[in-house]
């Protein structure tokens, strides 16, 4: 999914792929009565906005690309369809939470199999339920588009990817990738 979302050139099927991913995810969560049609325009806006932001950077890493996507998605909250009531922690606003979850899951799926230099992220990112809840609650607090937030999200994805894909991490004395 990474190339469809962020590839050069991006594929024209990206909105359809994102919608299909979201539909499958909603169904897996037990949400059967939903309609994404009203949300497609906002979702398209998020994808275009993320793509535009990525193109402003000089050689962004895959982690920055998914961080920009996550940040744009959570900030915009394009999805109005709720998860089942029991899925939400008490301390959050529902709309922010399910958008954070979907953004994370799309980003997580996009990273699986992606290339870091010459190496491939063969193992998916995994986190505990407790980590997931805390991360989603933190994502729910994103209320503005600031580069610092994107950088923090990128570091989280990078750290998680390195944890589950040994030998991928750049060594401390290695030059920065170009």
Image (tube, helix red, strand yellow):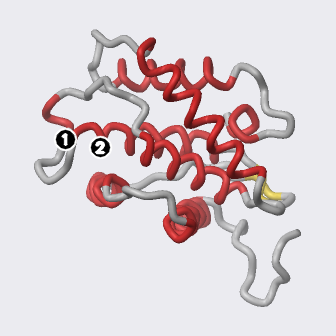
Residue receiving disc 2? 97
Q: Which of these two is toward me, 168 or 19?
A: 19
Instruction: Say which element carries label 2.
Output: helix
Residue 115's x, y, as percent? 78, 52
In the image, taking residue 43 as reference, residue 101 lies left or right, namely left
Precedes in sequence: disc 2 or disc 1 = 1
Q: Which residue shows up at 50% across the image and 58% down it?
A: 145
Q: Which residue shows up at 73% across the image and 41% down it?
A: 6
Quarter holding the C terminus is bottom right
Q: Which of these two is toward me, 15 or 105?
A: 15
At label 2, counting other C-alpha atoms closer than 10 Å, the crowd grade (few under 14, some 14-19, many 20 or more) is: many
Residue 114's x, y, as percent? 72, 47
Q: Which of these two is toward me, 125 or 99?
A: 99
Callout count: 2
Q: Which residue shows up at 80% across the image and 58% down it?
A: 119
Which circle, 2 or 1, is nearer the viewer? Answer: 2
Q: Which mark is residue 88?
A: 1
Quarter holding the N terminus is top right
Q: Which of these two is toward me, 65 or 53?
A: 53
- Looking at the image, the residue that sits furthest to the left is 90
Q: Which mark is residue 146?
A: none
At label 1, counting other C-alpha atoms closer than 10 Å, the crowd grade (few under 14, some 14-19, many 20 or more) is: some
Q: Quadrant of residue 4?
A: top right
Q: Are marks 2 and 1 in contact (CB under 8 Å)?
A: yes
Measure the alpha-carbon separation of dots 2 and 1: 7 Å
In the image, taking residue 15 as reference, residue 117 lies left or right, namely right
In the image, taking residue 173 as reference, residue 152 lies left or right, namely left
Residue 165's x, y, as percent? 63, 60
């Amino acid at each position: 999914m990474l190339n469809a979302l962020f590839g050069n050139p991006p594929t024209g099927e990206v909105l359809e792929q994102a919608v299909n991913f979201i539909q499958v995810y909603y169904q897996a969560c037990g949400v059967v009565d939903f309609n994404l049609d009203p949300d497609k325009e906002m979702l398209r806006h998020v994808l275009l906005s993320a793509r535009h932001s990525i193109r402003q950077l000089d050689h962004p890493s895959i982690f920055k690309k998914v961080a920009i996507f996550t940040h744009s998605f959570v900030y915009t909250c394009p999805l109005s369809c709720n998860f089942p009531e029991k899925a939400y922690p008490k301390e959050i606003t529902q709309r922010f939470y399910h958008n954070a979850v979907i953004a994370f899951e799309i980003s997580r799926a996009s990273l699986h199999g992606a290339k870091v230099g010459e190496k491939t992220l063969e193992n998916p990112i995994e986190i505990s339920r407790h980590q997931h809840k805390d991360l989603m609650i933190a994502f729910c607090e994103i209320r503005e588009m600031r580069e610092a937030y994107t950088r923090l999200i990128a570091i989280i994805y990078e750290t998680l990817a390195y944890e589950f894909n040994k030998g991928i991490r750049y060594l401390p004395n290695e030059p920065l990738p170009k």
